[in-house]
Image (cartoon, rainbow, N blue to C red):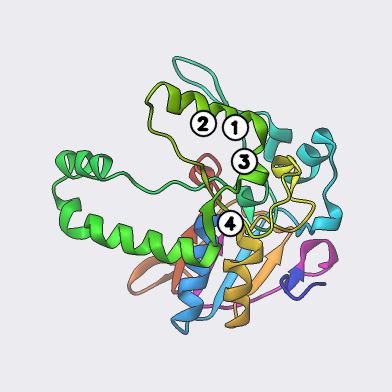
Amino acid sequence: MSALVHTDGRDVKVALTAEADVVVVGSGPAGAAVSRACALAGLTVIVLEEGFEARPRDFNASGFRAMASLYRDLGMSVAFGPSVIPFLQGRAVGGTSVINGAICWTLPRDVHEAWVKADPALGDALPFEAVAKAESDVEARLNVRPTEPSVAGAKNLLLAKGAEALGLEHRPIRRNERGCEGSGRCLQGCPNGAKLSVDRTYLPDAVERGARLFAGVTVTRIRGVADRMGYRPHPVARMLSAGQTTTIGI
């Protein structure tokens, strides 16, 4: 067991009962953020994660091994519609933040304005200034910063030169990392521990404030209890953050 994981599902041989004010399903960026916020607010929190904890020493350069151990559906998830679109989802403590490129974007003002135009109530409920403040807080915790030239490499520096020659606006991408060595293995898990995924930031913050993380636990449904107020889930609150395709099936 690690300092981060309270219970590993592989070690559970009998039924367990646990109580909390908030139960969060999924330990990726959304689940980790909710867990941290609730724990900092003094609530008791349980985080349930289907995948397992992986550390830098566990990561391998093999894409196949990474997909087998860190990705949902072996990295072959697809969305069906007019076009078939493949997408990647992590299945590990830290969710997709463990296997993404650590690239961070902020919400453009014109996009927010389009949302408010479509739903005017959003302007009061989620003003752009509040979004910008929250983004600033996230970037500070995750050490989001422009990619260093030494890491960007010759090809990206050449691309920047070409953009300048054409008069195009450009800038280095901003990434959540500290000490990136440019290994080019972001999608297999950072072997240097430089990527500041949520298993290295938000989840430890939550655990430090008393949250309990259960790894290797698959949630298939939520059962409620009946009382005079009607049918309700047993926890005070629940947060489903198991990915945009998995959450709807719970």
Looking at the figure, which quarter contains the N terminus? bottom right
The residue labelled by disc 4 is 26
The residue labelled by disc 2 is 160
Q: Amino acid at mark 2?
A: Ala
Q: Are marks 3 and 1 in contact (CB under 8 Å)?
A: no
Residue 82 spot, x, y in % from top left:
44, 14
Q: Is residue 18 magenta?
A: yes
The residue labelled by disc 1 is 156
Q: Amino acid at mark 1?
A: Asn
Q: Is residue 6 magenta?
A: no
Callout 3 crowding tier (Cα within 10 Å): few <14, some 14–19, many ≥20 = many
Residue 205 spot, x, y in % from top left:
58, 75
Mark yes or no: residue 126 visible.
Answer: no
Q: CA distance from mark 1 to mark 2?
A: 6 Å
Near-viewer residue (204 or 31): 204
Residue 214, quarter of the rendered image: bottom right
